[in-house]
């Protein structure tokens, strides 16, 4: 669902139904315990061998059944049984792979089904209760990439990319964290403090080297002491800009802090995909005001955020665009300062700059526009309009926020105040998103209000710099059009 235009207190639309438009998985990724049990493989050719190689990564007993074993299984810790599989062979079996597409395979599948054991028939998705993902193995850490049987080649390419990102020492690091569990539980009663410790441990730049040198445990202990001395840890609030709505326009810092946050308090214009980037167990609180939905006043938001931080939580206060631009950050910062709470601001791509990028419009341009003014059209008074008219006349580019519903009035007012009717105008609805829509024309055309703008928040550019952008795909406002520079 596309959010619609609004004011700073009222620009939230993201509805609880948003996620319904996402494709759903037909399989549920889990890590399934096979220790102490048996994995049965039916078949003796290369397909069976490939599955055997996968199965021996686990500690399960791997047993293959075939009339003949054509592939070379030497060196693999498996048991080869030269006969057809029987019902009793499935006792204590956790999983069954069928690498025989003939009569014997079908019989094996029937037996496994009767015994209630999940079956995978190699390369026959419709005969599979489960799929084998591409696996990244850093035991005890494993990463499984699955395409539900649709695109195994793509899954393998993704695996290669992730492999390159992960250090070979990851498993040892996980083991070290696991070995610290009792001490950490004893040191901190509070879950947030424990989490802070583990984060410091696993992100410590020196830890992997220390492990390699046999010093990992000492370093983990020293870190624990330092954390205990610090006390239970104070909460913090990060005011984070989420950008205009595309996930990949989020900064790396924003992404990292979202991962660290215990609570994510977000406005309505922030897309679900960005909110999803937080930790799975982080609490998420929507405070944006959608029409017809319960809404928070600014004072309630301030109180909420301060209460959470006082509980020792790390709060990601997620706002669309840049938090310092029409985001009521000023009020929140004042309240946090008064309450003595630590805070930090993480900038984001503000809507007007996303709109400039979308349309290749330089908002400053030598000899054309010596600067830009980003202003809110909502509630603009006489003085504002006089002011903007003279700024635009002097060659600055205007970027108006929250102006869609009053666009034609603002255009007419600017003309009344002496701004040239032929001043170029460009409008970007849903800037920075795949569903953006562009409009171009002149101030006169905007005043005549000839088009119905698409659903969604909009930026209105006014000024000569607009003609230097690429508005080729724009729907035209009422004539006359501006001449492309
Ligand atoms: N802090 C935000 C602005 C919030 S005020 C920022 O820096 O972008 C809400 C207004 O921002 C909307 O009325 C609209 O004018 C603008 N806006 C927000 N997201 C937008 C988008 N993706 N495309 C165009 N305009 C957007």
Image (tube, grey):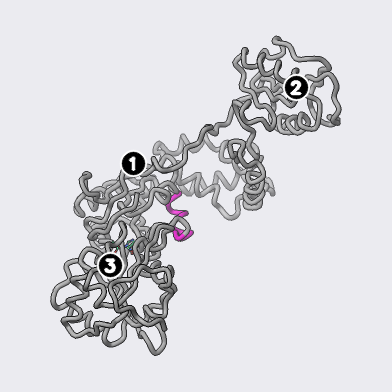
Name the residue nearer the viewer: 427 or 337.
427
Q: Mark 3 and mark 2: span between their CA atoms?
A: 67 Å
Quadrant of the image where one finds ligand 1: bottom left
| Residue, disc 2 | 102
Q: CA distance from mark 3 to mark 1?
A: 27 Å
Category of crowding for the residue at label 3, using alpha-carbon neighbours closer than 10 angstroms: few (below 14), some (14–19), many (at least 20): many
- At mark 1, the secondary structure is loop
Q: Which residue is mark 3?
A: 401
The label nearer to you, 1 versus 2, is 2
Disc 2 crowd rating (10 Å Cα; few below 14, some 14-19, many 20+) is few
For residue 17, the mark is 1
The answer to whether mark 3 and mark 2 are in CB contact below 8 A is: no
109 displayed left or right of 382: right
**Residue 258 sits inside the magenta stretch:** yes
Q: Residue at x 58, y 48 (%)?
A: 219
- Residue extent of the magenta highlight: 249-259
């Amino acid at each position: 669902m596309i959010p619609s235009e609004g004011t700073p207190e009222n620009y939230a639309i993201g509805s609880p139904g948003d996620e319904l438009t996402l494709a759903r998985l037909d399989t549920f990724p889990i890590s399934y315990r096979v220790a102490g049990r048996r994995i049965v493989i039916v078949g003796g050719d290369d397909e069976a061998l490939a599955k055997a190689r996968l199965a021996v990564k686990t500690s399960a007993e791997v047993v293959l059944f075939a009339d003949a074993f054509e592939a070379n299984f030497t060196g693999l810790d498996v048991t080869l049984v030269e006969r057809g599989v029987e019902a009793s062979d499935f006792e204590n079996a956790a999983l069954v792979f069928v690498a025989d597409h003939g009569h014997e395979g079908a019989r094996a599948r029937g037996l496994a089904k009767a015994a209630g054991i999940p079956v995978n028939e190699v390369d026959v998705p419709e005969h599979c209760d489960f799929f084998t993902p591409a696996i990244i193995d850093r035991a005890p850490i494993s990463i499984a990439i699955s395409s539900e049987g649709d695109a195994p080649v793509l899954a393998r390419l993704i695996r290669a990319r992730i492999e390159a990102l992960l250090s070979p020492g990851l498993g040892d690091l996980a083991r070290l964290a696991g070995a610290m569990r009792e001490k950490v539980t004893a040191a901190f009663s509070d879950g947030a403090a424990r989490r802070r410790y583990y984060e410091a441990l696993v992100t410590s730049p020196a830890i992997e080297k220390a492990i390699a040198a046999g010093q990992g445990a000492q370093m983990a202990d020293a870190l624990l002491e330092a954390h205990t001395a610090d006390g239970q840890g104070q909460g913090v609030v990060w005011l984070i800009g989420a950008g205009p709505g595309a996930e990949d326009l989020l900064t790396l810092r924003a992404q990292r802090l979202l991962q660290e946050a215990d609570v994510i308090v977000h406005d309505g214009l922030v897309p679900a995909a960005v909110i999803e980037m937080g930790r799975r167990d982080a609490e998420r609180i929507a405070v944006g005001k959608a029409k017809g939905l319960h809404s928070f006043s600014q004072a309630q938001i301030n109180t909420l955020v301060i209460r959470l931080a006082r509980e020792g939580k790390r709060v990601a206060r997620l706002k669309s665009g840049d938090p310092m631009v029409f985001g009521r950050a000023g009020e929140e910062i004042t309240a946090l300062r008064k309450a003595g709470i630590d805070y930090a601001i993480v900038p984001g791509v503000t809507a007007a700059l996303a709109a400039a990028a979308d349309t290749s419009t330089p908002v400053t341009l030598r000899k054309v526009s010596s600067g830009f003014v980003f202003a809110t059209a909502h509630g603009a008074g006489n003085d504002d309009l006089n002011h903007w008219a003279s700024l635009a006349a002097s060659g600055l580019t205007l970027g108006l926020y929250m102006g869609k519903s009053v666009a034609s009035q603002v255009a007419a007012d600017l003309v009344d105040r002496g701004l040239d009717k032929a001043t170029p105008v460009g409008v970007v609805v849903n800037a920075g998103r795949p569903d953006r829509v562009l409009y171009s024309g002149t101030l006169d055309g905007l005043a005549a209000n000839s088009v119905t703008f698409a659903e969604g928040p909009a930026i209105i550019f006014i000024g000569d710099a607009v003609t230097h952008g690429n508005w080729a795909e724009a729907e035209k406002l009422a004539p006359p059009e501006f001449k492309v520079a």
